[in-house]
Image: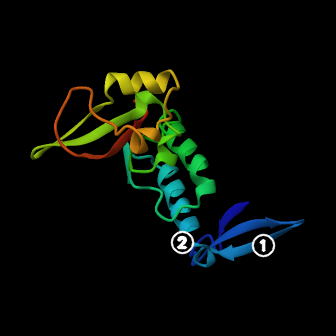
């Protein structure tokens, strides 16, 4: 329900307010789960002032409760439009990838000793646009690949949300 500092001038604890029936229960941030603290850290990064030009999150799902996934993805998606910086995510999570459209998904692929980053292969992009595949299926059914054919192992997806 809320997050407040225990003292404005020299804070020692952040207090998280939880709604429980008709009462608010306050817990110190240190008493919260690891996943909640990670989720909170991502929100702090996204809402920092002044905002950063670029925010990079590597595998942001580690420890995050699955129920918070779509909320976090929504925050990643709207951050650039609200002037909070461009967000780049790397993920191997089909569940997170499902929250992004074909235009914001890029592939990271190794070609020999080079790492190449680029758009999805044309037929994969079309499958997403026509809703024949969900974005997460690129990681489980049809490995995402670059538009131009390169040999090498698929490493992950890079999602650059915003322009």
- Mark 1 to mark 2 CA distance (whole Å): 19 Å
Tell me which colouring the rendered structure shows.
rainbow
- In the image, taking residue 91 as reference, residue 1 lies left or right, namely right
Q: Quadrant of the N terminus?
A: bottom right
Query: Image point 48% across, 22% down: which residue?
Result: 129
Tell whether 66 sits left or right of 20.
left
Measuring 57% from the left and 42% from the top, which residue is drawn there? 74
Q: Position of residue 157 (x, y in %)?
A: 35, 43
Q: Which residue is labeled 1 in the image?
A: 25
- Residue 133 drawn above or below residue 57: above
Reply above or below: 17 against 51.
below
Q: Secondary structure at mark 2?
A: helix
Tell me which corner region of the image, top left, top right, bottom left or bottom right, holds residue 117. top left
Quarter of the image for residue 16 reads: bottom right
Of the residues under marks 1 and 2, which one precedes in the sequence? Answer: 1
Disc 2 crowd rating (10 Å Cα; few below 14, some 14-19, many 20+) is some
Furthest-front residue in this view: 141
Q: Nearer the viewer, residue 55 or 60?
A: 60
Residue 108 locus on image (x, y percent): 27, 41
Residue 114, image x and y in percent?
12, 43
Q: Are marks 1 and 2 in contact (CB under 8 Å)?
A: no
Residue 88 vs 66, above or below: the answer is above
Quarter of the image with the C terminus in it: top left
Residue holding disc 2? 34
For label 1, the SS is: strand
């Amino acid at each position: 329900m809320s997050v407040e500092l225990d003292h404005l001038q020299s804070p020692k604890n952040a207090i998280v307010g939880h709604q429980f029936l008709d009462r608010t229960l306050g817990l110190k941030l240190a008493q919260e789960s690891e996943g909640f603290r990670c989720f909170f850290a991502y929100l702090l990064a996204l809402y920092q002032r002044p905002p950063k030009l670029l925010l990079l999150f590597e595998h942001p799902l580690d420890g995050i409760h699955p129920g918070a996934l779509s909320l976090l993805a929504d925050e990643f998606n709207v951050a650039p439009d609200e002037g909070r910086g461009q967000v780049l995510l790397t993920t191997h999570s089909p569940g997170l990838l499902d929250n992004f459209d074909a235009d914001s998904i890029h592939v990271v692929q190794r070609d020999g000793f080079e790492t190449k980053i680029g758009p999805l292969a044309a037929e994969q992009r079309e499958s997403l646009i026509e809703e024949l595949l969900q974005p997460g299926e690129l990681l489980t059914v049809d490995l995402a690949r670059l538009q131009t054919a390169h040999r090498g192992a698929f490493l992950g997806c890079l999602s650059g949300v915003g322009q």
